[in-house]
Amino acid sequence: MSQQAASQHAAPADRPLLGVGILGAGPVTQAIHLPALARLQDILEVRHIMDVDAAVASSVAARVGATAGTSMAALLDDPAVDVVAICSPHQFHADQVIAACRAGKKAVLCEKPFAMNAEEAARISAVSAETGVPIVVGAMHTFDPGWLAAEQNWGDLPGQVHTIRSSIVLPPNARFEDFATEIVTRPAAGRPDYSDPDVIKSALRGGIMGLAIHDLPLVRRFTPDFTDLEVLQVFHVRPFGYAVSLRTPTRVIELRAVMNGTWKPQWTFEAIGDDAALHIDFTPSYVQAGSAVATLTRGNGSDTRTFGPYGHNGYEGEWRELAGLARGTRQAPAAQTLIDDLTFALAIADATAASAGAGHAGAAGKAGVTP
Ligand SMILES: NC(=O)c1ccc[n+]([C@@H]2O[C@H](COP(=O)([O-])OP(=O)(O)OC[C@H]3O[C@@H](n4cnc5c(N)ncnc54)[C@H](O)[C@@H]3O)[C@@H](O)[C@H]2O)c1
């Protein structure tokens, strides 16, 4: 039975289903969003899928009984579409978010990063304010119930933190994508030329804006003085990864990631203070197996509280948030928060790439590329 057919029986009469339109039907739509939406058929129904590749659009739309097309305008004109998800490559995000807001949709979900520079972010913010259309950015960890429970319970932790760490060990995305579904498209990737400094710079920038960005809104919650950012050390890790240490006048920030055949996948976030600490184990990207588990510790460890795992993850959390915003049962996040998160990410990405380009030696005397 198609998702559409199944869900027609699931919606309560007093709360009609919200129609979803998706721009870009690549691996993230297929392996992340459609499985998450399949669990939310009592509130959301996929009705229109657009991709510039007609074969991809029709094949993916057929899985969920949705209309397929190659035209963004047709999707935005479709009255069956209430909310729009933007899952195209990042360079199209800003213009597509703006078009969806101008089309008068009820809410917009944009995959990260929602813009690639401050000028794009400001344009989006202005259009969201003018049209009143709420925007959710697909930084799934900020919607994870494990993170949200920690936030409600961490008390004075943000004020006393001195060290913040995001550590990510994952297999390449394709491994997860293939487990999750039969992917009908995947762009061919050439072999990068690591002897070219510009390749290293752009890989580091891509690592921060593509992967670290999931945790950067979390890092920002514990970094009040980020305008004074200093890079201590930067390493590019092959085939894909980074080891970046930064400091502000009061915080040390460590961002580490490696994507290779390593077992086992691990994604941890830590914020360590003088008398308290937060440790979160997130489920890896793509994995739809419940929420993160957060542990808050005080003093010598005798006061330890654990939150999670809860039944749903951050991907489902994003869609629940979007549905609540579209129905007006949740309050829209301040556009300024999205801008500040992006400004923070861009500052770190720029500082990291610049340090790599300058052959940065940093305080620890370390810079470079791992073998
Ligand atoms: N949240 C997460 O865990 C997560 C993980 C990986 C990637 N992402 C993000 O999700 C987005 C999509 O990732 P992906 O791996 O599916 O990307 P992709 O580039 O592999 O696929 C995107 C799809 O968009 C289509 N497309 C290209 N130009 C388009 C346009 N102008 N309008 C509509 N469709 C267009 C392509 O044909 C392709 O089918 C990216 O922004 C990426 O950063 C998120």
Image: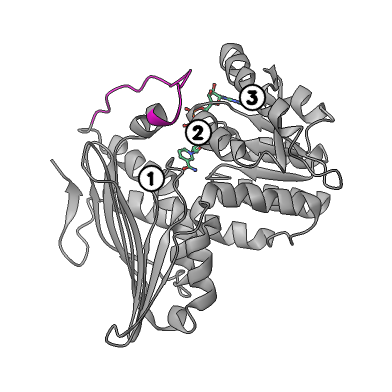
Mark 1 and mark 2: span between their CA atoms?
21 Å
| Segment colored magenta | 179-193
Q: Residue at x 57, y 61 (%)?
A: 340
Q: Is residue 245 magenta?
A: no
Question: For this rendering, which residue is in front, 226 or 291?
Answer: 291
Q: Give whichever of 16, 217 is nearer the camera.
A: 16
Quadrant in which the N terminus is drawn: top right
Q: Label 2 belongs to which residue?
A: 28
SS for callout 2: helix
Asked if marks 2 and 3 touch (Cβ < 8 Å), the reply is: no
Q: Amino acid at mark 1?
A: Arg
**Marks 1 and 2, the one that precedes in the sequence:** 2
Residue at label 3?
A: 64
Q: Where's residue 234, x and y in %?
A: 25, 54
Residue 60, quarter of picture: top right
The residue tagged 1 is 205
Q: Position of residue 160 (x, y in %)?
A: 40, 83
Q: Residues within 10 Å of mark 1 (few under 14, many from 20)?
A: many
Residue in the picture at 41% in, 57% down:
348
Q: Residue at x 77, y 49 (%)?
A: 326
Q: Amino acid at mark 3?
A: Val
**Mark 3 to mark 1: distance in Å?**
35 Å
Mark 3 or 1, which is nearer the eye? 3
Q: Main secondary structure of the magenta part?
A: loop
Dot 3 or dot 1: first in sequence order is 3
Q: Residue 149: horizontal and vertical position, in percent?
A: 52, 69
